């Protein structure tokens, strides 16, 4: 009895294994696809490196607040020794005058003094070969505000890099949603094509039976066959397009598995969106391009302030210590010294004035560019908003058409089996139903793509997922 139970259990186990589909694709939600995109996308990695570069540049600019310590050394060979030459006649001439005042006719002493006065005394100070090793410290204590404005520029550069990454992330989300929902659309189109082909295939089998019984002629049966073959060709074309969409999504999210991706997040549409004025109010503060231009204005403003500090002197503390010296005595050059000094550029050929003028023009250009960008973005926003509304209107209109087409297919199939409808009428109803279902799916897809573009222009692409949770999904197309 126990052996029989074990055998039954084993057979039941293998039967259960056979119930599961083998080689099933990888199911991915939209959120999971986004995570995979962020993990492997090179554009986002480049944006991260740009943030890192901006932070390093900010630290480099902050280094001007600290003193600089340098070591210098030199070996010098001079053509002559450094020495002091002192002629002796400046001492002997006063002595001669004194002797003449005492002994007017003296010749012997005067000749001796003249002989001595023709010579010079030599005092060596440094040899021809000199070597020194020095340590120097320089600490600016006042630069007119240059370091403060440079630090602000560094901070703004980091903000610009972060904003650039946000824009790259938004662009990648647009591409992902287009690819993900494009694959979802292709998948549903294949399902519709398969359903249409199966219906026409079943209708063709019925037509063969009716032709054999003499209830329809050969022309009607051939008409059904032609439309069935056309449905098969459309199904094969849809499958090929689905394969292209598969490769596009897998390449975008860096998925190397051979299994296909099965997108499980459905297409959706919202019954209503906030007014277009709401989205326009977000552009000025949230759009990535507008924020980048605003940050560039900030940089231009600080560059203008740095240019104006050129009229102010720089004050710095300095110190020097000679660690090793050969040929230079301490009594000539001290080994250590400290002090404070300033430098003041009185005239530089109007270079400061040109820099200030250039910074003003740059700032004015950026202001005009920001205003133009806002105007252009509002036009793009109107376009995307209009696309969402058109898609919503199409879905609303097609819902009624789908209900009518499904009912028409049901009635004509029943009438055909009773001899009350022709094959042409049944085929037309089947084809019309598939067309309106595909048109409705396409309207859903167009809505989703327009919505992510709309939200990205407003700088809030992450709110797309909230709209998807609140929206009506594609299942309404097939549940009417």
Image: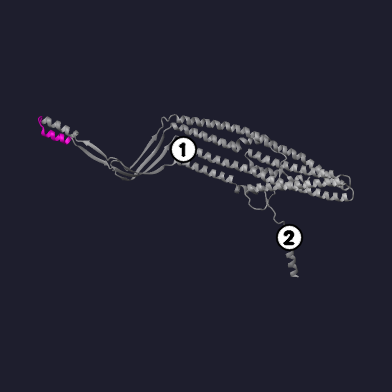
Residue 266 at x, y percent in the picture: 71, 46
Q: Is residue 110 left or right of residue 247?
A: left
Residue 191 lies in the magenta stretch: no
Q: Which residues are magenta?
A: 103-117
The CA span between labels 2 and 1 is 74 Å
Q: Nearer the viewer, residue 472 or 198?
A: 198
The front one of 251 and 379 is: 251
The residue under label 1 is 147
- Quadrant of the rendered image containing residue 160: top right
Task: From the image, tell me which residue sits under label 2.
Answer: 16
Within 10 Å of disc 1 (Cα), the crowding (few <14, some 14-19, many 20+) is some
Q: Foreground: 180 or 146?
A: 180
Does residue 455 appear anywhere in the picture?
yes
Q: Indicate whether 135 appears above or below 373.
A: below
Residue in the picture at 73% in, 60% down:
16
Left or right of residue 11, residue 71 in this image: left
Q: Secondary structure at mark 2?
A: helix
Place of residue 422 in the rendered image (x, y in percent of width and height, measured from the top left): 86, 44
Q: Earlier in the sequence, mark 2 or mark 1?
A: 2
Residue in front for this viewpoint, 117 or 479: 117
Main structural element of the magenta stretch: helix, strand or loop? helix
Q: Nearer the viewer, mark 2 or mark 1?
A: 2
Q: Which x, y percent locates residue 61?
A: 47, 40
């Amino acid at each position: 009895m126990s052996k029989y139970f074990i055998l039954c259990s084993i057979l039941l186990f293998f039967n259960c294994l056979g119930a599961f589909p083998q080689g099933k694709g990888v199911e991915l939600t939209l959120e999971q696809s986004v995570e995979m995109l962020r993990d492997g996308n090179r554009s986002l990695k480049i944006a991260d490196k740009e943030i890192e570069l901006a932070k390093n540049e900010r630290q480099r600019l902050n280094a001007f607040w600290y003193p600089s310590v340098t070591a210098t050394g030199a070996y010098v060979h001079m053509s002559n020794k450094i020495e002091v030459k002192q002629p002796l006649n400046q001492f002997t001439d006063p002595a001669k005058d004194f002797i003449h005042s005492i002994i007017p006719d003296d010749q012997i002493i005067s000749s001796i003094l003249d002989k001595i006065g023709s010579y010079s005394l030599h005092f060596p100070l440094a040899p021809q070969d000199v070597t020194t090793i020095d340590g120097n410290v320089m600490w600016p204590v006042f630069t007119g505000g240059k370091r403060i404005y440079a630090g602000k520029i560094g901070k703004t550069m980091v903000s610009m890099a972060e904003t650039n990454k946000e824009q790259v992330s938004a662009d990648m989300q647009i591409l992902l949603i287009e690819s993900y929902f494009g694959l979802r659309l292709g998948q549903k189109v294949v399902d519709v094509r398969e359903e249409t082909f199966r219906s026409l295939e079943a209708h063709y089998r019925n037509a063969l039976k009716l032709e054999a019984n003499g209830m329809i002629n050969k022309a009607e049966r051939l008409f059904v066959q032609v439309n069935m073959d056309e449905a098969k060709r459309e199904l094969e074309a849809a499958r090929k397009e689905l394969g292209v969409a598969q490769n596009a999504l897998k390449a975008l999210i860096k998925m190397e598995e051979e299994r296909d991706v099965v997108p499980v997040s459905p297409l959706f549409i919202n019954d209503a969106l906030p007014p277009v004025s709401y989205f326009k109010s977000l552009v000025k503060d949230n759009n990535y391009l507008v924020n980048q231009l605003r940050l560039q204005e900030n940089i231009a403003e600080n560059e203008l302030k740095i240019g104006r500090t050129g009229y102010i002197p720089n004050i710095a503390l300095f110190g020097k210590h000679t660690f090793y010296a050969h040929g230079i005595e301490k009594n000539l050059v001290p080994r250590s010294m400290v002090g404070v000094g300033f430098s003041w550029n009185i005239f530089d050929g109007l270079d400061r004035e040109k820099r200030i003028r250039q910074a003003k023009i740059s700032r004015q250009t950026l202001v005009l560019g920001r205003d133009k960008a806002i105007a252009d973005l509002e036009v793009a926003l109107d376009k995307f908003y209009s696309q969402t509304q058109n898609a919503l209107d199409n879905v609303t209109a097609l819902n009624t058409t789908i209900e009518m087409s499904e009912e028409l297919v049901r009635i004509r199939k029943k009438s055909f089996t009773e001899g009350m409808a022709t094959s042409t009428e049944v085929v037309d109803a089947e084809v019309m139903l598939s067309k309106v279902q595909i048109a409705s799916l396409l309207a859903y897809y167009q809505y989703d793509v327009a919505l992510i573009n709309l939200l990205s222009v407003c700088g809030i692409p992450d709110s797309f997922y909230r709209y998807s949770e609140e929206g009506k999904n594609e299942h309404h197309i097939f549940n009417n």
